[in-house]
Image (cartoon, rainbow, N blue to C red):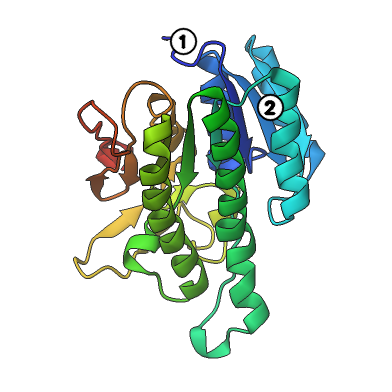
Amino acid sequence: MSKRLQGKIAFITGAGSGIGEATALRFAEEGATVVLCGRRIEPLQGVQEKIQALGGQAEIAVADVSDEQAYVGALQATAQRHGRLDILVNNAMAYTWGGIDTMTTADWHANFSTTVDGTFWGTRTAMQLMKEQGGGSIVNIASICGLFGTAWMAGYSAAKAAVINFSRAAASEGAPHNVRCNVIIPGVVDTPATASPIMSSGRRPVRSESRPDGITAQTLPAAKVASAAPAIPGPRCSTSVTNSGTSAMRSPNADHPVAKFDSSAAR
């Protein structure tokens, strides 16, 4: 395997499981020193051990992304310790489940505090650091729910839609400074977070996405999503992934063709 990220410092939130864990493993395999961020140290230690067993480099930063001071402090400490921050992956998310007519204001806000506020705080801090050092790459993880909307997950769908358009704006602002911001848009991914309640109990999850085209999406392995991520911090544009096909976004200053990722093989 190539070492596209050799010598890079990569900070990944929600790195204790799912897409975050898979991305951390892939980044380390590609040569990056990975900083694993999450609320609980035990899952992060498990991922760190996996990376070290494969000969990679991994550190742990315990921080709640919904806590501005804790998250910003962890990013700044990483940059100070290593002299730079090359890559930020805003992967951490939170969601609530239920109908709009029964959703509380607290439930609504819970969808935004980590997914939207955390992504903003991380992107703002990373852009400040990366502009000073002459460039860098920010990768935000969204969801197909942010494109189509998903019944019983209105708050989550709205939050992920915000991440998609925020990433577009950040890409435009960062481009003149060689700071690229891209977004990956997965479909239904097989992770602990999707084990319930949106999945069918007792069997490999398959569900309708409530989409106008009537496509039924199957789950995508987290490692499949992670395989798209290493190309983004390199000299290529971003890739977004859905279970039903491909789409992509790139920063305005990207000078390479859009790299498309077909997830149909995962079905």
In what element is the residue under mark 2? helix
Name above or below for residue 2 compared with residue 153: above
Dot 1 amino acid type: Lys
- Res. 143 in view: no
Seen at 77% across and 50% down, the residue is 69
Say few, some or many: other residues with alpha carbon within 10 Å of mark 2 (under 14 / 14 to 19 / 20 or more): some
In this rendering, the label closer to the viewer, 2 or 1: 2
> Percent position (x, y) of residue 199?
49, 61
> Percent position (x, y) of residue 57?
67, 15
Res 47 quadrant in image: top right
Q: State the residue position of label 2.
A: 79
Q: CA distance from mark 2 to mark 1?
A: 22 Å
Name above or below for residue 11 compared with residue 189: above
In what element is the residue under mark 1? loop
> Percent position (x, y) of residue 107?
63, 76
Left-right relation of 151 to 115 = left
Q: Please state, as top left, top right, bottom left or bottom right, where the N terminus lies in the image.
A: top left
Seen at 31% across and 25% down, the residue is 236
Name above or below for residue 104 compared with residue 159: below
Q: Nearer the viewer, residue 28 or 250?
A: 250
Q: Which mark is residue 77?
A: none
Left-right relation of 150 to 51 = left
Left-right relation of 83 to 142 = right
> Percent position (x, y) of residue 31?
54, 13
Q: Which mark is residue 3?
A: 1
